[in-house]
Amino acid sequence: MAVKKTVLLVDDSRVARMMTRKMIETDRPGWQVVEAATGEEALEVYSRVLPDFVIMDVNMPGMGGLEATKRLKSVYPQAVVTLLTANIQDPVREQAEEMGVGFMSKPVRGDVLMAFLSVDEA
């Protein structure tokens, strides 16, 4: 029997969260998906839920995804995070690599998302 996991989706776009949630729920039935709309909310939800995976949008009002990820990884270095953005720039990619987090482009492709959600199954 497959182990049920928890995924934290962080994106200021409700539609983006809804679409990503649907992909996860379709491919990983029984997994729990929790959401946050800001970087600040993501830190609070992570500390409460301790999810197995975090999908973090880069560009959000207030605390963006890069800053939220830095803060998250400083407290929870074991956090499995991937950054998500429609605007892939080398400096953002480099910062992601420096923090040891993944990187996906928007719109999210199902195969790329499922590969990220399988990192600990290899």
Image (cartoon, rainbow, N blue to C red):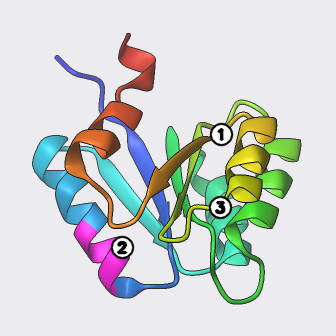
User: Does the CB distance between marks 1 and 3 fall below 8 Å?
Assistant: no
Q: SS at mark 1?
A: loop
Q: Is residue 113 left or right of residue 74?
A: left
Residue 107 is a magenta residue: no
The extreme front residue here reads: 90
* Of residues 75 and 56, the one drawn nearer to the viewer in this rendering: 56
Q: Which residues are magenta?
A: 15-19
Q: Quadrant of residue 120?
A: top left
* Residue 119, image x, y percentages: 43, 24
Task: Answer few, some or many: residues within 10 Å of disc 3's Cα (few below 14, many 20 plus, some between 14 and 19).
Answer: few
In the image, which disc is placed on residue 101?
1
Number of marks in the image?
3
Question: Of the residues under marks 3 and 2, which one precedes in the sequence?
Answer: 2
Q: Above or below — where is 122 with respect to 103?
A: above
The extreme top residue here reads: 122
The answer for how far apart the CA atoms under marks 3 and 2 are is 22 Å
Which amino acid type is marked by label 3?
Gln
Magenta span dominant secondary structure: helix
Q: Report which residue position mark 3 lands on.
A: 89
Task: Answer few, some or many: residues within 10 Å of disc 2's Cα (few below 14, many 20 plus, some between 14 and 19).
Answer: many
* Residue 81, image x, y percentages: 59, 44
Q: Report which residue position mark 2 lands on.
A: 17
Which amino acid type is marked by label 2?
Arg
Q: SS at mark 2?
A: helix
User: Does the CB distance between marks 3 and 2 fall below 8 Å?
Assistant: no
Q: SS at mark 3?
A: loop
Tell me the mark number nearer the camera, choosing from 1 and 3: 3
* Of residues 18 and 85, the one drawn nearer to the viewer in this rendering: 85
